[in-house]
Amino acid sequence: MVFRRKLMTNGGGTEGIPKVLGAFTANKLFGRVFQCAIVALWMVPLTAVLFLILSYFGFSVASFGSESLVGTPYGPVEGFEFEDAFVYLGIPFAKPPIGELRLEKSQRVERWTETLQATEFGASCVTAAGWSSRRNEKLDENCLFMNIMRPKEKSKNSTGYPVFVFIYGGGYETGTSTSYGYKEIVRNFVTQGFVFVTFNYRLGPLGFITTEDQVLPGNLGLWDQKSALEFIREVIPSFGGNPDEVTISGESAGGSSVSALTLSPLTNGLFQRAIQMSGSIFCSFAMSPRIGNQSREFIETIGCKGSSREIKECLKKKTLKDYAEAHATIGPALDTIIGLRYNPRIDGEFFPSDLHSMIKAAPKVPTITGITTAEMGAFVLFGENRSLIDVPQRKWNSFNEESLREILKKIAGRVSNLNELLAKFYVDRADKKEFKNSSFYLTRLVEATGDISFDVPVFQEAAEKLESGWPVYLYLEEFYNRNGRENVPVEGAFHGNELTYIFGRLWKQISAAKTEDGERFKKNLLDGFRSFAQSGRPSVGDIEWQQITLDHSDRYMSLNVESVMKEGLLRERIDFWTKDVPLAVDVNELKYLLPGARKRRRVDEL
């Protein structure tokens, strides 16, 4: 962060003015000139004081300097102009979690008296691996920064613009708000009357390691998110936003974070709507009971031992190089579907009870949630040996029935009877017209792993929220850009497909070429999200996006070139996991794959 010259100067008292002026009473003209000069000098600190007072109460102070200069309750902030917006990057929203504050809950940032030059992204949080795939990206523990984009024009609504918050994904091990930039955000949201916010949160062991007690309960990354939302509520009026019209959104781990924030009693009232893209706290990567064992393995590898307090103090003294080397030694969790090691957990505070109880107790926040048609496509085909489901490109053409059965057996793992069920459903089930080649078996692997990792958990959360009276809107993202996918053996929209249309090209593997169909899909996607954030009633063009009901519990918006409402979201596959499997296996064992698993009687048996 960069600060301007100090606004306040020493002095500013008025007691000496009469004495000084008295010496010049003999010359009235000179005395008058001198008096004016002294008063003018005295006004400099007075103006600075007035500026700080206005800043403290959150008034805009653009008239004191550049148009992008605003006063916030924490101090003045100056950004820069981009097209029809003002952009503010790298605003600290919490104290740096370094030194003694490492592995502690984020704390309120201190006020500043100098103008904060918010013109560059702040450092990204240290990833689990300790490095970034983005060139020239700075990683640091001092990373709790926020970015705000607002329209130039003042809102015609006296309460301000609606606020749209986005939380990045990355499996709680990687990710940064820097990746999403600001240019497309301005074009897709700010010019349409939104104040848009992104921020960083701690990742990997620094954000989620736990000793499974109150000494180091975990969930620090979620506490960062809570702090960010509290900061937004305080400062967003200064940027023209309405603190009572906040929509939080996120994708993947960001989507599961949004899910978590809707359930925790600690975040009640900090937002009014939620959008979960391919993520739920019911996902195994978001609420796995493995986190205890994974944490212990890391703690042993980095060389800490003793009581929980001794372990915590030891972890505070280790260098970031120590953290990176320990992670490299352990490597990804090769016995899991996605290969991730760190995630939130039920800690008795951020999450005071189980997921089902929290859904019943939490405020009924209107929620959009959905999935893509082939969530695990990229994980299976381009996983780079990070998990047990990776199929390297050299093996695509030879992948067969035996290959699929072998991986499904590993997935079933310790869950008794599950292997037989998986084989019957994903291998033996087939339309007579389907040709069983390598593409068929790879597609079935993508379906099976996608159902476990994303599809079923998202639906489970939606169904439970529906039962408790939450307004829920489902979607299935069906469109994808086929450019560059000619030699990929699995069709469908992969995980993160929508991000390119919201934020621009994020990965070089994704085609940057615009197509007419892609632009139509983009319009439909943005129409749905923006209308929801503005009014709470989503629509795509002239089509009403209907919420699910007890009679239509799996109806959804098909997000495509031509978007329409449909019934039966992946019905056969969802029924298999929510009705058939829980009756045939030990549900407690199943929770390792599906944390939200519950034994239910089939509807047709009631």
Image (cartoon, helix red, strand yellow):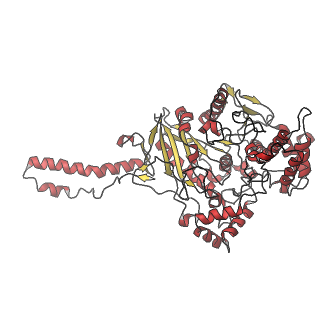
- The answer to whether residue 559 is seen in the rendering is yes
Residue at the extreme top of the image, as rendered: 542
For the image, the number of numbered tags is 0
Name the side, left or right, on which 83 lies relative to 382.
left
Q: In the rendered view of the protein, which quadrant contains the C terminus?
A: top right
Residue in front for this viewpoint, 166 or 18:
166
Outermost residue toward the bottom?
A: 306
Question: Is residue 217 in view?
Answer: no
The residue drawn where x is 42% and y is 41% is 68
Q: Tell me the residue at 73%/52% (across/down).
A: 285
Q: Which of 343 and 130 is in front in this view?
A: 130
Q: Residue at x 83, y 52 (%)?
A: 411
Q: Quadrant of residue 292?
A: bottom right
Farthest residue, direction front:
394
Spot occupied by residue 466 in the image (x, y as percentages of width and height): 75, 41
- The answer to whether residue 162 is above or below residue 234 is above
Vertical relation: 279 (above or below) 160: below
Give the image location of residue 27, x and y in percent: 7, 50
Q: Nearer the viewer, residue 383 or 32?
A: 383
Q: In which quarter of the image is residue 565?
A: top right
Residue 414 rendering spot, x and y as whole percentages: 86, 58
Specify whether 49 is left or right of 441: left
Relative height, residue 306 to residue 206 (above, below): below
The spot of residue 388 in percent (x, y) is: 79, 53
Nearer the observer, 424 or 549: 424
